[in-house]
Image (cartoon, helix red, strand yellow):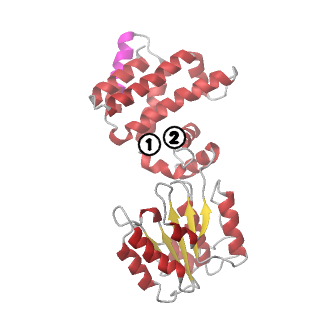
Amino acid sequence: MVFSKIIGQPKAVKLLSRALVGDRLAHGYLFTGPDGVGKTTTALALAAYQFCEARDEARPCGRCGGCMKFASGNHPDFLTIRPDGAAIKIDQVRGLKKDLRFSPFESGMRIVVIEDVQTMRREAGNSLLKILEEPPPDNLLLLIASESEPILPTIISRCQVIPFVPLTMDQAATVISRLNPQLDSKEAHALAVLTSGCPGQVQALHSEEVLNLRNDCIQAMLAGSQTDAGSVELALDLAGRVAELKDGLDTFFDLLAIFFKENMVAILCDGEGSGDGEVDTARESWNLQQLSDMVQAVDSARRGLAGNCNRGLVCEVLMLALLAR
Ligand SMILES: [Zn+2]
């Protein structure tokens, strides 16, 4: 399968596979959907297949000249356009127009991937529209757009639109584990929930450091301390590390809240053990009210930071609330 690595996008894979097998590719596709669900990965899989000089029906060979050049980022018939700063500029589209005047150099088809099409302003968009209206032969344009901003309707009307959707949590966790083999299954699942089924967004979350701290914090809470003084010392120590997270702090709060809420759901759903040591210990340690209080403590810390309260103090108050209750 050309798209065997694409998880959770059956509709997109079916549409593209059919077109590939029947040699009926359109000249322009628009992949739409949230960030991090596999749009660019799919475009690259399609390009890899097209550039292989010895492909069979199933996949590129990975060894021929075409495959080697594409893998090294040096295929002369593969072009990528990304926003220059905040948006794709008209000069970039003009440059593309010039490139398209020539026939593909080595393969039967040139492939152009244009990322973040939604950033184009009207002028650049209209210039791209002219290309889409009279596409030079042997060129395939793959436009990729997130749903954050609307796209010019005229561009949409000139492309075949392929919608991409968020993955299920299990699918997202599978992708996250594959991309980050150092994570255990609990961490992958927590990140799947955190990204709402858009696993490609994980890289932006500074996950390793944040995950370590999330794990240390939960383990400390579950282990408890024999003495009040020990709890306070541990809480202040963790608070110091949390305060240093900078951009990762929101993610850390999210991960804690997800853990508490998952335990609330587990308590509400059944009385049986889940087989997950962390969750089962949590259910033995805390009741619904305590878990609810912990969620509120996290929310309160979030509000404190939004209101410009002292960062170190906010983290200390939170960790004391969680560990030295
Ligand atoms: Zn090949």
Q: Residue furthest top?
A: 227
* Residue denoted by label 1: 208
- In the image, residue 148 sits, relative to residue 104, either above or below, namely above
Residue ID at (63%, 76%)? 26
Q: Position of residue 151 (x, y in %)?
A: 49, 63
* Quadrant location, the N terminus: bottom right
Q: Which mark is residue 282?
A: none
Range covered by the magenta-colored residues: 228-238
Nearer the observer, 301 or 134 = 134
Decide: marks 1, 2 in contact (CB < 8 A)? no
User: Which SS class for mark 2?
Assistant: helix
Gap between marks 1 and 2 measured at Cα: 14 Å
What amino acid is found at the position of numbered circle 1 in the picture?
Glu
* Residue denoted by label 2: 194
Please check the rendered image and state whether residue 21 is part of the magenta-colored stretch, yes or no.
no
Left or right: 142 in relation to 88: right
What amino acid is found at the position of numbered circle 2 in the picture?
Leu
Left or right: 304 in relation to 258: left
User: Which SS class for mark 1?
Assistant: helix
Left or right: 127 in relation to 23: left
Q: Position of residue 88 (x, y in %)?
A: 39, 68
Tell me the quarter of the picture where residue 278 sits. Answer: top right
Left or right: 257 in relation to 284: left
